[in-house]
Image: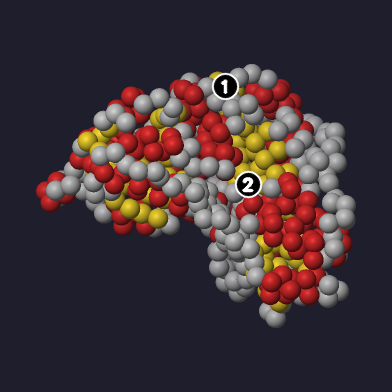
Amino acid sequence: MQDRNGAETLVETLLAGKVDVCFANPGTSEMQFVAALDKIPGMRCVLGLFEGVVTGAADGYARMADKPASTLLHLAPGLGNGLANLHNAKRAQVPLVNIVGEHRQGHKETDSPLTGDIEGVARTMSEWVKTSTSADHIAADAAEAIREANTLPGRIATLILPADTAWTKAQPHGKLDFAAPAPTMPSSAQFDAAVKALQSGEKVILVLSGRALRAAPLALASQIVQRTGATMLAQYANGRIERGAGRVAIARTPAPVDQGVAAFKDAKHVILIGAKVPAPMFGYPGKPDYLMQPGANLIELAAPTDDLHETLRELAARLKALDAVPLLEAQKELALPQGVLTAEAVLRTISALMPENAIIVDESISAGRSFFPVSMGTPAHDYLQLTGGSIGSGLPMATGAAIACPGRTVINMEGDGSSMYTIQALWTQAREKLNVVTVIFANRGYQILKGELVSVGAASWGERAERMLSIVEPDISWVKLAEGMGVEARAATTCEELAQLIRHAVSRPGPFLIEAQIGR
């Protein structure tokens, strides 16, 4: 083994652990790592112009690759800038390895301007945090970070690298262990409780999330439903759902609290498979904090750390449902809408024109809530959504998903207000020549928040409130913003124009942005 400094050892260890993409926004304390990335072949390095783009792209990559990328972030402020999309990544239960540069050991005593509590910042969104204190420890520490990240259902691990450990020569290390712990299974008693409920003749709802929403586990869930008469729902917010023609259709738990309560109104038993207890995103005056009826029987069959696929297989076997026929979605010829653009018309047009095996990234917030019923019968696709409620994830997530799956078309359904949080991701899409079609729902306001004013009891509002919830005066041109970052872009004011632009966008390589001017 040739002489390596700590940074070079870290790059080699990441590559040995199959972490071969690094989303980066480096600074001075990370320059040794940058030099190591340049020296050692094998790592794809992707520059983001804001740390929220970096962490959001790592989230999207992991959702589609089922393995971690690394980030490269600059000290406590850089990590802090990326926290919102680390929050979304944590809620999506993805594997992710953060590499955060730190001052040279001893320099923190000077309290220079960028000094901060990196470990404290990291712990807010990381399940594992460690600072390497010696170049000789970096290989073992990085291997541990990869093991932790790959522990089901997927975890965020943050490794902090003081600058002197990066530039100091590292001693040779022994064999490294990258193997994550084996997945667990529910106890026999948990299976017994679920089987008893499903054979009771009473209304049962299975609530699924995580990897239970992939095609094969969903087929098993459908077999259980066909055999027992139960109902199944996806948790409202999920990292990835495999859906479309030839797969099992599943509805999501409704987001509005009254609709959510209605969905669980008659359920005597609710069985959780990798999902949380059904609850609305916020608490509202006079509304319940949980969607289930009081007294309903809650059975937490499988935790996110369990093997959800094998859990469903075992449950189906105990119910003698493995010979049942799963109900698969049939492909339909969807009609294109005509005339003035509405939010639903945009969804219908995307549904009718999406190519086979597309990846749909949804941060359309309120505008996209009807996408699931509207898109029934579309070609098979993966659906990724905002999971933690912290807006600004869509553009970076689409960027990372496109890097994970270069042969597939990514369609990002993006709210106009949300897009402005991380609009810099368009520049990365252009630089990397990614096949991302971004459709901006340009309704010129935070429409979701206008609805929330009513939900919390503020039924009327005046000019000052309106100005806080609208993005006009001046109007924003997403076409000009995109073109300024190297992305071809056009605006659509009718359904016919939108359809023409989508056909053009999915037929060509590289990124394309469509500003869907709704209600003009």
Quarter placement of the N terminus: top left
Residue 392 appears in the figure:
no
Residue 381 appears in the figure:
yes
Q: Residue at x 80, y 61 (%)?
A: 317
In the orientation shown, which residue stands out farthest toward the bottom? 295
Image quadrant where residue 266 sits: bottom right
Tag count in the figure?
2
Crowd around label 1: few <14 · some 14–19 · many ≥20 (10 Å): some
299 vs 50: above or below: below
Amino acid tagged 2? Arg
Q: Secondary structure at mark 1?
A: loop
Residue 432 in picture, x, y percent from top left: 49, 24
Quarter placement of the C terminus: top right
In the orientation shown, which residue stands out farthest toward the left? 110
Tag shown at residue 444: none
Q: Residue at x 59, y 61 (%)?
A: 184
- Position of residue 392 in the picture relative to residue 253 (left or right): left
Q: Earlier in the sequence, mark 2 or mark 1?
A: 2
Q: Residue at x 67, y 40 (%)?
A: 382
Q: Which residue is mark 2?
A: 240
Of residues 520 and 53, the one nearer the viewer is 53
Q: Secondary structure at mark 2?
A: loop
Q: Nearer the viewer, mark 2 or mark 1?
A: 2
Q: Identify the coloring.
A: secondary structure
**How far apart, in angstroms, are the residues tagged by discs 2 and 1?**
23 Å
Image quadrant where residue 12 sits: top left
Q: Which residue is mark 1?
A: 510
Residue 435 in picture, x, y percent from top left: 59, 26
Amino acid tagged 1? Gly
- Position of residue 180 in the picture relative to residue 157 (left or right): right
Residue 73 in picture, x, y percent from top left: 34, 40
Residue 470 in picture, x, y percent from top left: 51, 45
